[in-house]
Amino acid sequence: GGQTPLARRLPKLPGFRNINRVEYLPVNVSRLEEKFEAGDVVDGASLKAKGIIKHEDALVKVLGDGDITKALTIKVDKVSASAKAKIEAAGGKVEEPC
């Protein structure tokens, strides 16, 4: 008899969740190609204005899926290496804090 131990009363949850994980919202260069004009500046405010993200202070990472032909200035939190290469090949530039 007796009371059931605490470790047996609690539910068994799978996996591990890192509380220090940083989540970035992914945005592909193909999406930038269709939403922006040549010479535009891509930052949190412009992404929110175009309806790509919901909050302009969200962390954004530009990924290299698709093609881009317009010269854009990118000012987001992170840019993948393939996206940076495609943006610079199209005549655009990637500025810090990337």
Image (cartoon, grey):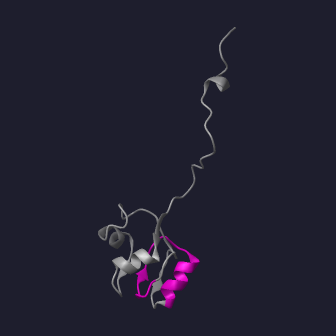
At horizontal 37% and vertical 64% (from top left) the residue drawn is 53
At horizontal 46% and vertical 73% (from top left) the residue drawn is 28
Q: Is residue 38 magenta?
A: no
Farthest left residue in view: 49
At horizontal 46% and vertical 77% (from top left) the residue drawn is 29
Q: Position of residue 51 (x, y in %)?
A: 32, 67
Farthest top residue in view: 1
Above or below 62: residue 59: above
Q: Quadrant of residue 3?
A: top right
Farthest front residue in view: 66
Q: Position of residue 38 (x, y in %)?
A: 35, 87
Q: Is residue 83 magenta?
A: yes
Q: Quadrant of residue 76?
A: bottom left
The residue nearer to you, when weighing 48 against 20, is: 48
Work out which quarter of the rendered image holds the N terminus and state it.
top right
Q: Position of residue 11 (x, y in %)?
A: 60, 30
Q: Which residues are magenta?
A: 68-89
Above or below 60: residue 70: below
Left or right: residue 62 versus residue 34 is: right
Query: What is the count of numbered marks?
Result: 0
